[in-house]
Amino acid sequence: MLYDILTNRLAVNILKGLSDNEKKKVYSANINELTGDRAQVEVAVVLLSSEGLVYKEEQLLSISEKGKRFIEAFDGLVVVFRNEQTETKENVEIKYDLTEFEKKVLFTLFRIYQETGEDVALSTLTQELFPYENPERRKLRISKELKKLEQLNLARKVKKERNVFAEITDSGLKVIKRQIVKEVKKVL
C-alpha cells in the first residue's frame, strides 16, 4: 500500500495540504473543495482513509497522527532527495557499527589525505594497509571495503583516467572525529 500512496500524487498532495492546514489551525477540509478530477479525488481519499492516514466524516477530511508522521517522513525524504542540509539536533548522533578493518581503512584514508591534500590512489591505500604484501593481490579486498564505506556514504571511489582514487566524504570526516578518535583516546 505504501507504493500505492507514493505513486498517487493527488493522495500525497491531499495529505500534504491537510498537514499544512493543520499548522494554520485549520483542522479539516471539505472533499468537494479539493482540486482535481472527482473520481481521482475519491480514489485518493479512499486510499488515504483505508491506511489510516486521514479521517473521513461525510464530506470532511482531517489528517490523523499516522498521516502527520507520514508527511514528516516524506518531507525528510524530499530533503534527502534534493540533497539539502537540514538542521541536526546536537543531542542526536549516528553511530556506525564498522568492523575494525573498515575503521582502519577509513582512518588510513583520512591520514593519507591529511598528509597529501589529494585524493588517495587505491594502490597507495593498499600499499599503506598491506606494506609487506604484493599490493596487486590486496587491491580487490580494499576495493570491496571501499564499496561498503561508499554504501554508508563515508568514502567514495573516483575514477580518473585509468586510475581509481578514494576520497573521504563529509560524513566520513564526522565519523573520524566522533567515533574513531574516541576509540583511539580510549586505547591511549
Image (cartoon, grey):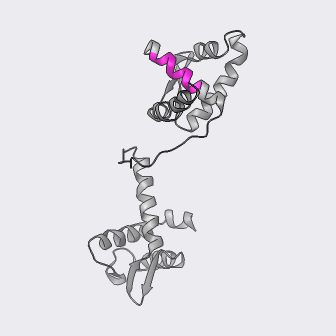
- Residue 7 visible within the image: no
- Residue 103 visible within the image: yes
Quarter of the rendering occupied by the C terminus: top right
Where residue 95 appears, as percent x and y from the top left, is: 54, 42
Q: Magenta part of the protein: which range? A: 105-114
Tell me which residue sits at (53%, 75%) in the image.
51
Tell whether 44 sits left or right of 149.
Answer: left
Where residue 72 appears, as percent x and y from the top left, is: 42, 62
Tell whether 139 sits left or right of 65.
Answer: right
Question: Would you say residue 97 sits in the magenta stretch?
Answer: no
Question: Would you say residue 110 sits in the magenta stretch?
Answer: yes
The chief SS type of the magenta part is helix
Tell whether 136 sits left or right of 158.
Answer: right
Depicted 169 relative to depicted 18: above or below: above
Q: In this view of the protein, which residue sits in the foreground, 33 or 138? A: 138
Q: In this view of the protein, which residue sits in the foreground, 104 or 159? A: 104
Q: How many numbered markers are drawn?
A: 0
Q: In this view of the protein, which residue sits in the foreground, 123 or 133? A: 133
Tell me which residue sits at (44%, 33%) in the image.
170
Depicted 100 relative to depicted 152: above or below: above
Depicted 92 relative to depicted 130: above or below: below
Where residue 176 appears, as percent x and y from the top left, is: 50, 30
Depicted 11 relative to depicted 112: above or below: below
Tell me which residue sits at (34%, 83%) in the image.
32
Where residue 68 appears, as percent x and y from the top left, is: 42, 69
